[in-house]
Image (spheres, rainbow, N blue to C red):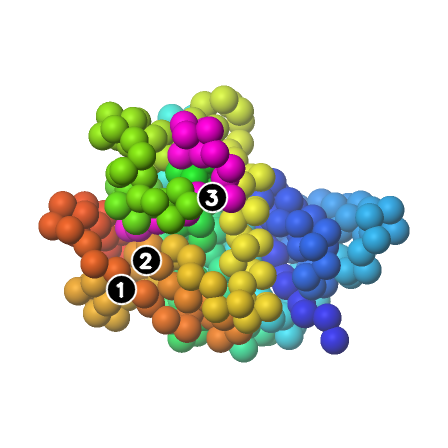
Amino acid sequence: MRKKVTVVGAGHVGATLAQRIAETRLADVVLVDVVEGVPQGKSLDLLEAGPVLGYDSKVTGTNGYEETAGSDVIVITAGLARKPGMSRDDLLAANVNIVKKVAGETGRRSPDAIMIVVTNPMDVMGYVAMRTCGFPRERVIGMGGVLDSGRFRTFIARELGVSVENTHAFVMGGHGDSMVPLPRYSTVAGIPITELMTAEQINRLVERTRNGGAEIVDLLKTGSAYYAPSAATLEMVEAMLLDKKKILPCSVYLEGEYGVKGTFAGVPVKLGAKGVEQVVEIKLSADENAAFMKSVDAVRAGCEKFT
Ligand SMILES: NC(=O)c1ccc[n+]([C@@H]2O[C@H](COP(=O)([O-])OP(=O)(O)OC[C@H]3O[C@@H](n4cnc5c(N)ncnc54)[C@H](O)[C@@H]3O)[C@@H](O)[C@H]2O)c1
């Protein structure tokens, strides 16, 4: 039987993710949105691309939740997108109620699913979703680090004139302005970028990575990035549906790892069929640890409002 993925929010990120899932033949997709006709229309459009591209994935659009029952993975992209000049944190209040509703409705109907939270501010929304649906921490995961490290990898590859496939990068901490890209653990063909670039070059790329979301918002004027965010989410969905045991930077609820308890934060984790199968603890220097803790504190302040 084909796997089933529910994507809530049929906007830019959600609909593009549905397209990527269908085109990679990973699963059937149920696309949910509050706007009447939009999930139905986009789903029908995606179905009609199937014969041309050669995929048989069933794509169903709905304004309700009955069709989502028995999903293997639930992805929450419902909410408001960032507007120019608006920080991720401005979105907090607006999106909490949406995420509570969506996590409750989907969690009840798919109690064994793994939930991926994309809605911003993602780390806090992950916490809100976990509290609402009552899933164990292994099965509620925030998407942010894969996107941030993808942006860092893009800039590294372009700076050095090498293939993106040769690059690897780690970004830890909250998915916000305080995120912590880690140059020591970022490599090209296994060589740390600290041996390939000057400190000035690295700082420039780190800054651009931190501002990666805002750079695109400023260019688009309305709406925010969705091609790379949906690609990053697909990598996580694929790692779990195919039980790949892939180590990726994701936001998870920490229970003592890195000396942090009781909040979500971006850390390297092993993703497989059970969701988060391990939190990978890497050694941080004093400076890296200080930046990570500062970022975690910013997320914790958001989470504490909802305990
Ligand atoms: N974590 C990340 O790295 C990352 C990256 C990109 C975008 N985002 C976030 O993802 C979210 C979606 O972004 P987008 O560009 O797709 O926005 P969008 O506005 O295009 O789509 C959001 C969709 O959610 C729907 N929606 C609103 N309330 C809903 C509800 N109660 N139930 C179901 N659907 C509902 C809207 O109708 C809309 O279609 C935003 O919060 C954005 O900030 C996060």
Residue under the point 87% across and 46% down = 52
**Chain part drawn in magenta:** 156-173
| Extreme-right residue of the structure | 51
Q: Earlier in the sequence, mark 1 or mark 3?
A: 3
Residue picked out by circle 3: 166
Does the magenta portion include 170? yes
- Mark 2 highlights which residue? 267
Viewer-side label of 2, 3: 3
**Could you say where residue 280 lies in the image, as x and y percent from the top left?**
32, 65
- At x 31%, y 34%, the residue is 196
The residue labelled by disc 1 is 281
The quarter of the picture where the N terminus appears is bottom right
Q: Amino acid at mark 3?
A: Asn
Outermost residue toward the left in this view: 286
Q: Residues within 10 Å of mark 2 (few under 14, many from 20)?
A: many
Name the element at disc 2. strand
